[in-house]
Image (tube, rainbow, N blue to C red):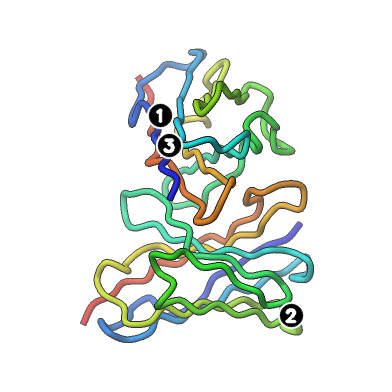
Amino acid sequence: DIQMTQSPSSLSASLGDRVTITCRASQSINSYLNWYQQKPGTAPKSLIYTSSSLQSGVPSRFSGSRSGTDFTLTISSLQPEDFATYYCQQSYTTPYTFGQGTKLEIK
Amino acid sequence: QVQLQESGPGLVKPSETLSLGCTVSGGSISNYYWNWFRQPAGTGLEWIGRIYSSGSTFYNPSLKSRVTMSVDTSKNQLSLNLSSVTAADTAVYYCARDASIGDYFDSWGQGTLVTVSS
């Protein structure tokens, strides 16, 4: 299975901050990397697909990028509704696998 | 906008079979892949497998020996069976649809908690 490693596992930040979350794949997955946001008690919500494409309806402060097997989710200016857990997921091959999550908390 | 709703017993005894349904409304099941996931409390997401509307399936090898998925296009319903459950199968179970424009999951059910306990 392809292992997805996210860092950091948790992050404290303030409103208006620029935040970056990283995900590293254990092998090449091309750009088949997706990002999801999950708030407590709710299902994951799609944010970014194929590394850098913004899901319809998602604010433009969210962006994604790729460098080899390293992927980055950036939130340009944190809003109150952004405090949640973020997961990366590879869709290069089955079994699809997720990172362990990054919990973004208010400082 | 498509909506998904999981259903099934919240409590299953060890060694028995976990059976869940997922009703799709606001759209057709046809011509999409449909997936099942689970998430133990406080931990990450695990992909269980997927089924196409034609009935073809792909299971996670870690669960393949115990998983069966099916689809009923006439009822717009999916089903998941997981046999010989143990406490390790306690989790929130989700169904989700593959996006039509890429290999990701764009619509999710709200999830249903299944506890395995005697």
User: In the picture provided, is A58 more to the left or to the right than B110?
Assistant: right
Mark 3 residue type? Ser
Residue B27 lies, with reference to residue B43, above or below; the image says below
Residue A28 lies, with reference to residue A22, above or below; the image says below
Q: Residue at x 47, y 49 (%)?
A: A97
Chain ID at mark 2: B
Q: Quadrant of the C terminus of chain B?
A: bottom left
Chain ID at mark 3: A
Q: Nearer the viewer, residue A82 or B27?
A: B27
- Alpha carbon of mark 1 to alpha carbon of mark 3: how far? 24 Å
Chain ID at mark 1: A
Is there a contact, CB below 8 Å, between mark 1 and mark 2? no
Q: Nearer the viewer, mark 1 or mark 2?
A: 2
Q: Nearer the viewer, mark 1 or mark 3?
A: 3
Label 3: few (<14), some or many (≥20) within 10 Å? few
Instruction: Identify the residue at the far left of this view.
Output: B118
Q: Estimate the x, y position of residue B31 in percent, counting from the top left.
A: 78, 66
Label 1: which residue?
Answer: A104
Instruction: Identify the residue at the far front of this view.
Output: A27
Quarter residue A10 falls in: top left
Label 2: few (<14), some or many (≥20) within 10 Å? some
Quarter residue B30 falls in: bottom right
Label 3: which residue?
Answer: A26
Q: Estimate the x, y position of residue A46 in percent, counting from the top left.
A: 61, 43
Q: Residue at x 42, y 46 (%)?
A: A40
Label 2: which residue?
Answer: B73
Residue B113 lies, with reference to residue A37, above or below; the image says below
Q: Nearer the viewer, residue B49 or B22?
A: B49
Label 1: few (<14), some or many (≥20) within 10 Å? many
